[in-house]
Each structure stands twice: as C-alpha cells, then as structure tokens.
Image (cartoon, helix red, strand yellow):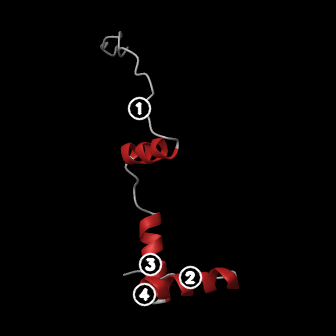
Amino acid sequence: MASIIVRGLDAAVKQRLVLQAKEHGHSMEAEARDILTRATGQPHIGLALLRVAKRVNGADGLQVPERSDTARVAEFE
C-alpha cells in the first residue's frame, strides 16, 4: 500500500479532520484515507444527474422530446 505526505496543510483543516475522525470513530489517518478514497472514485453519471435533479425540485416537470432521428452508418473514406 502506498503512502503520501501532505505538506503545507492549514492547521484549521487538520483540526477539522481530527474532529471529523473522532466523530466517525477513526484515526486521523483512516479518516483521510476514507476521504481520499471517496473523492477519487469514478462517479456514476446517471446517479450524479439524479442527485442534481433532486436538488432542484426534481425532474418530473421536464418534457422529453420525441426522437425523430434515425441511426446512420458511419462512412470512413
């Protein structure tokens, strides 16, 4: 497993990290590892769009236009 060192971290950020770790019952290192793991995960675009829609009162009123186009074969010359 890899290790990293974070230099120049603001003292207030470190203190918030310590408090957050304590709230979650983790060490500061485990809390930082969890935050980094979640932050670097690949988001599911569909779920991300759903979360955004829910924040703006849903997408129930959105009109979905009828599809009238047809698939075309790509031509490579």
Label 2 neighbour load within 10 Å: few <14, some 14-19, many 20+? some
Q: Position of residue 63 (x, y in %)?
A: 43, 22
Q: Position of residue 67 (x, y in %)?
A: 35, 14
- Judged from the image, the secondary structure of the residue bearing numbered disc 4 is loop
Question: Do tag 4 and tag 3 residues touch (Cβ < 8 Å)?
Answer: no
Label 4 neighbour load within 10 Å: few <14, some 14-19, many 20+? some
* Circle 1 residue: 60
Q: Is residue 57 above or below residue 18?
A: above
* Circle 4 residue: 26
Q: Quadrant of the N terminus?
A: bottom left
Q: Is residue 43 above or below residue 15?
A: above
Q: Is residue 49 above or below residue 42?
A: above
* Circle 3 residue: 33
Q: Position of residue 15 (x, y in %)?
A: 62, 86
Compute the Cα span from label 1 to label 3: 38 Å
Residue 48 appears left or right of 17: left
> Quadrant of residue 40 in the image?
bottom left
